[in-house]
Image (spheres, grey):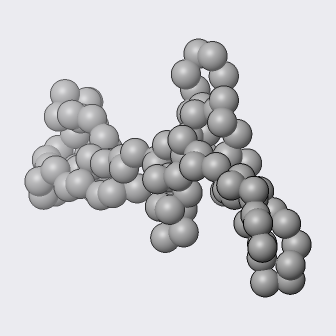
Amino acid sequence: MYIHSTLKINHMNNVLPFAKRSRHNDLIELKRNNPSLQIQWDLNGTWIDIDNPPWHEDVNYRVKPEQILRYRKYLDIEGNEILVGIDASKRSDFVKWLGDWQEMKV
């Protein structure tokens, strides 16, 4: 039986085109392990999260970069523990730091 080089026969004897290798194949493989993906939404380079990418050849996709949140607690003059992401030691309500800077992946 002769089969054209751009066609294959599946198990139900339907003729299907061979899947072209997409420029997104590496990301498609990664998506199977459920990483967070983003799509470049506009020409300004804005990236947004996407759950089910359509994998258009003319669209850019990427694995969402890991973000690190840095924070530290301080005690204010009223006895409250305040969580901040900046140096708050110059604030008028600052009493003392309650530990070192911490990092958390988000």
Q: Residue furthest front?
A: 1
Total residue callouts = 0
Comparing 72 with 95, the one in front is: 72
Q: Is residue 81 visible?
A: no
Corner quadrant of residue 48: top right
* Residue furthest bottom in the image: 11
Which residue is at 61% across, 39% downward? Answer: 39
* Vertical arrangement, residue 34 with respect to residue 60, above or below: below
63, 13: nearer the viewer: 13
Q: Residue 84, image x and y in percent? A: 32, 44
Q: Residue at image x 21%, y 34%?
A: 87
Front in this rendered view, residue 59 or 98 = 59
Considering the image in quadrants, where does the C terminus appear?
bottom left
Where on the picture, by quarter, is residue 17? bottom right
Is 84 placed left or right of 36 in the picture? left
Can you say whether 96 is above or below 46 in the image? below
| Residue 6, x across and y down, in percent | 71, 53
Residue 47 seen:
yes
Q: Position of residue 72 (x, y in %)?
A: 23, 50
**Residue at x-position 68% and y-position 55%:** 5
Image-based side of 37 in relation to 100, left or right: right
**Outermost residue toward the top?**
44
Is 86 above or below relative to 69?
above
Foreground of the two, 76 or 68: 68
| Residue 84 falls left or right of residue 3 | left
- Report x, y in % for residue 74: 22, 50
Q: Residue at horizontal 54%, vertical 69%? A: 32
Quarter of the rendering occupied by the N terminus: bottom right
